[in-house]
């Protein structure tokens, strides 16, 4: 189905979706109670419910996203899952990434899901259950999460951080920090503390798209003094 510049593939299931201009929802995708912003793309066989996406978000095929809030220009790879999490702008999520999966309470007699899910027919009606998504899961801006990484509930990943392939992140990650391993541990900062503070202060990811496009080479540069001074000036004017 085509409405204006909106494309829904004939096999897609779309229910209560408020789509911006230029949105594409492709083969056998299931999208419900979701607001994709302008120029968003939802790939084949992906399932997205109760979520919002700012402009130019690209969701690859076979994703599962429930109660996600995804910032502009962020993209995901294939087979990525996001549960009850907030993702910032300009994030790069690779394939097979897991963000914000539910916790099982290992302090109880059983860790099985029947103590909070009615799917097994064992949960009494009106029984008070614990909220397995109560701890926030936040990915800030310009974060790169490599393939097969897992971001656990209750974790905040700071701006500009890098999560290595296969990492299991159980604790907060500081801005512009590279972490590896299971459990993940920091191995280095991307830049000096002075550069990190200056980059964070610019909040360049909030700049209008046309300003970023006009200054493309700046963003493709190593952040030396000349680069940072120019970026700071642009961001000050852009806001």
Image (tube, rainbow, N blue to C red):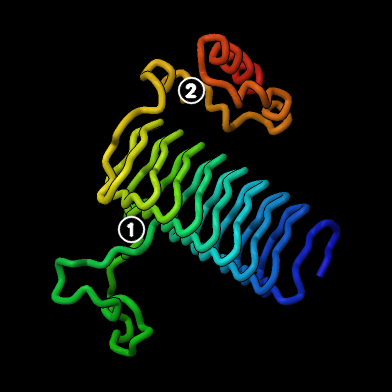
From the viewer's perspective, is 182 left or right of 177? left
At 83% from the left edge and 56% from the top edge, which residue is drawn?
5
At 61% from the left edge and 70% from the top edge, which residue is drawn?
45
Badge 1 is on which residue?
A: 134
Q: Is residue 115 above or below residue 202?
A: below
Quadrant of the drawing holding the C terminus: top right
Q: Nearer the viewer, mark 2 or mark 1?
A: 2
At 36% from the left edge and 52% from the top edge, which residue is drawn?
166
At 64% from the left edge and 58% from the top edge, which residue is drawn?
35
Q: Is residue 218 above or below residue 2?
A: above
* SS at circle 2: helix
As measured in the structure, the alpha-carbon distance from the residue carrying label 2 to the one carrying label 1 is 31 Å
Q: Report the disc number at residue 69.
A: none
Query: Circle 2: is it few (<14), some (14-19), or many (20+) Cα within 10 Å?
Result: some
Q: Nearer the viewer, residue 69 or 95?
A: 95
Q: Report the disc number at residue 199.
A: 2
């Amino acid at each position: 189905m085509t409405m204006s510049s909106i494309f829904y593939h004939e096999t897609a299931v779309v229910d209560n979706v408020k789509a911006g201009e230029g949105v594409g929802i492709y083969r056998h995708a299931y999208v419900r109670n979701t607001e994709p912003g302008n120029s968003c793309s939802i790939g084949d066989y992906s399932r997205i419910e109760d979520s919002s996406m700012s402009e130019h978000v690209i969701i690859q095929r076979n994703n599962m996203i429930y109660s996600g809030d995804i910032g502009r220009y962020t993209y995901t790879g294939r087979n990525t899952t996001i549960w009850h999490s907030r993702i910032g702008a300009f994030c790069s999520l690779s394939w097979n990434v897991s963000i914000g999966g539910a916790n099982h309470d290992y302090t109880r007699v059983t860790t099985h899901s029947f103590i909070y899910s009615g799917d097994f027919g064992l949960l009494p009606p009106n029984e008070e259950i614990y909220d397995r998504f109560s701890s926030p899961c936040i990915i800030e801006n310009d974060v790169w999460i490599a393939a097969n990484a897992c971001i656990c509930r209750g974790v905040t990943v700071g701006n500009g951080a890098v999560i290595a392939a296969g990492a299991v992140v159980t604790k907060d990650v500081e801005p512009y920090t590279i972490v590896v391993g299971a459990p993940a541990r920091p191995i280095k900062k991307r830049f000096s503390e002075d550069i990190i503070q200056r980059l964070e202060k610019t909040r360049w990811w909030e700049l209008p798209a046309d300003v970023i496009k006009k200054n493309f080479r700046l963003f493709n540069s190593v952040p030396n003094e000349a680069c940072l001074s120019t970026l700071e000036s642009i961001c000050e004017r852009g806001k």
